[in-house]
Amino acid sequence: MVWTGKWYPSMATSLIYRHIGLYRLAMNILYRGRYRGRFEQLFQELDGRGPSVCELCFGDLYVARWCRARGLDWIGVDVNRGFCRRARRAGFRVIEGDVLEVDLPEADVYVMAGSLYHFHDRLDDLFDAVFRRTSQFVLSEPVRNLADLGGPIGRLARESANPGSKPAPVRYDKQTLLEAFYEQKRRVGLHVRPMFKGRDMLIQATKP
């Protein structure tokens, strides 16, 4: 299928993004049963940053439930119709649509877990949109990926990453992720603090 720039979820969405059970299974395989640990790292960095949190490409609801338990105001943005429907059923506020096409809300801190690679060719637009609405952006991004492998496994991993917008064949490693952030640091005028946490790199970006 040729990507036309429009969203056709019934045709475009990869299998693992069509049901939360399949999504969690795939993530736990990738993280060797430690998928939830990615969020524990995020929670440590989100704690005390303010009463409102906007999560981009939220997928699962770990961050949302963590915020609810602490009385924080969480709102999620995701292009995936099924994930948004599930979040609404759980009583959470969501904005359904492409992060770069919707009207993003103001929040004390923005967060994104494992989805930056979907925007690798639109990072300037993403950072401009986020920092119009907040001064704090906390991200967790994998820097060791099956998609980096050759052969059928790597090809399958690359082609299976379509949440409902378009395929995302590019992945980051430590060097390319840091290069991307330091380019945004130079362009936008950010303070950037990277922390390597095993499979993922956790990065805080703040705008003075």
Image: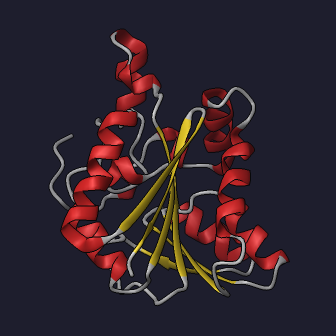
Q: Quadrant of residue 171?
A: top left
- Can residue 171 be seen here? The reply is no
Q: Give the quadrant of the C terminus.
A: bottom left
Residue 13, position as x, y percentages in the image: 41, 48
Q: Is residue 157 visible?
A: yes
Which corner quadrant holds the N terminus?
top left
**Residue at 77%, 68% in the rendered image:** 66
- Is residue 168 depicted above or below 74 in this figure? above
Residue 131 location in percent, x, y? 35, 79
Task: Tell me what residue is drawn at x 63 percent, y 78 percent.
Answer: 49
- Residue 155's quadrant in the figure? top left
Q: Which residue is rendered at x = 28% and y = 54% of the image?
A: 182
**In x, y percent, where is residue 20?**
65, 50
Q: Is residue 129 left or right of residue 140?
A: left
Residue located 44% across and 52% down the image: 115
Q: Position of residue 172 (x, y in %)?
A: 36, 37
**Rendered view: 7 above or below 201:** below
Identify the coloring: secondary structure
- Which residue, as the protein is rendered here, is positioned at the far right? 69
* Nearer to me, 97 or 118: 118
Q: Is residue 140 left or right of residue 100?
A: right
